[in-house]
């Protein structure tokens, strides 16, 4: 099933509507381990009932940008589902989602920007080298 490009969690959530609240997210490493994750083709909605997949359901997001470097950070809270069963304790409304800057993540709602990056046919052109340009002009 085609997916968008994986992204670090703060960037992924910043590209989603409402900063990703309500989205189902999962780290790329779960996919590589062969765990059942929400798989949906780009442009198709995710089914409402998910009885066997592993994912986090995002409940609260606080995005913050570092002023000097422009680096994006996020405090994300959600409910964890493992193979269709809620593993976040019933007494807790949600828990912290950790590893947002450590691993890359996918979402069941594909951000248009990441889908466009994934399927663009343009290869990234290397930056021009000023030394080569001056040598060819001479």
Image (cartoon, helix red, strand yellow):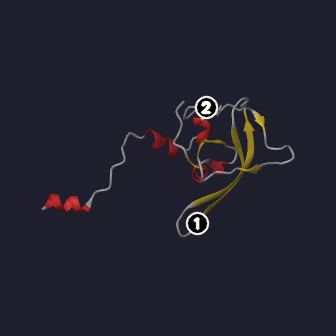
Q: How far apart are marks 1 and 2 (CA)?
A: 35 Å
Residue depicted at x 65% and y 42%? 25
Residue depicted at x 51% and y 44%? 114
Q: Name the residue nearer the viewer: 112 or 114.
A: 114
Position of residue 23 relative to residue 65, above or below, is above
Nearer to us: label 1 or label 2: 2
As helix, strand or loop, the secondary structure at mark 2 comes to loop
Horizontal arrangement in the rendering, residue 69 relative to residue 98 (left or right): left
Q: Name the residue nearer the viewer: 94 or 32.
A: 32
Residue 49, how many percent across, how many down?
Answer: 73, 31
Tag 1: Cα neighbours inside 10 Å, few (<14), some, or many (≥20)? few
Q: Can residue 135 be seen in this view?
A: yes
In the rendered image, which residue does mark 1 sit on? 66
Quarter of the image that includes the C terminus: bottom left
Residue 30, how many percent across, how many down?
Answer: 62, 38
Residue 12, how many percent across, how many down?
Answer: 58, 49
As helix, strand or loop, the secondary structure at mark 1 comes to loop
Please tell me which of labels 1 and 2 falls first in the chain: 2
Outermost residue, bottom side: 68
In the rendered image, which residue does mark 2 sit on? 34
Q: Can residue 109 be seen in this view?
A: no
Residue depicted at x 21% and y 59%? 133
């Amino acid at each position: 099933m085609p997916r968008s490009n994986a992204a670090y969690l703060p960037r992924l959530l910043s590209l989603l509507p409402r900063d990703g609240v309500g989205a189902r997210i999962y780290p790329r490493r779960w996919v590589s381990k062969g765990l059942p994750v929400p798989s949906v083709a780009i442009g198709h909605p995710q089914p409402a009932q998910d009885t066997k997949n592993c994912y986090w359901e995002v409940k609260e997001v606080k995005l913050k940008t570092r002023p000097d470097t422009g680096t994006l950070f996020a405090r994300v809270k959600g409910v964890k589902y493992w193979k269709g069963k809620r593993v976040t304790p019933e007494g807790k409304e949600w828990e912290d989602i950790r590893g947002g800057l450590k691993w890359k993540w996918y979402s069941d709602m594909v951000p248009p920007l990441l889908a466009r990056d994934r399927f663009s046919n343009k290869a990234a052109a290397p930056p021009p080298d000023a030394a080569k340009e001056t040598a060819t002009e001479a």
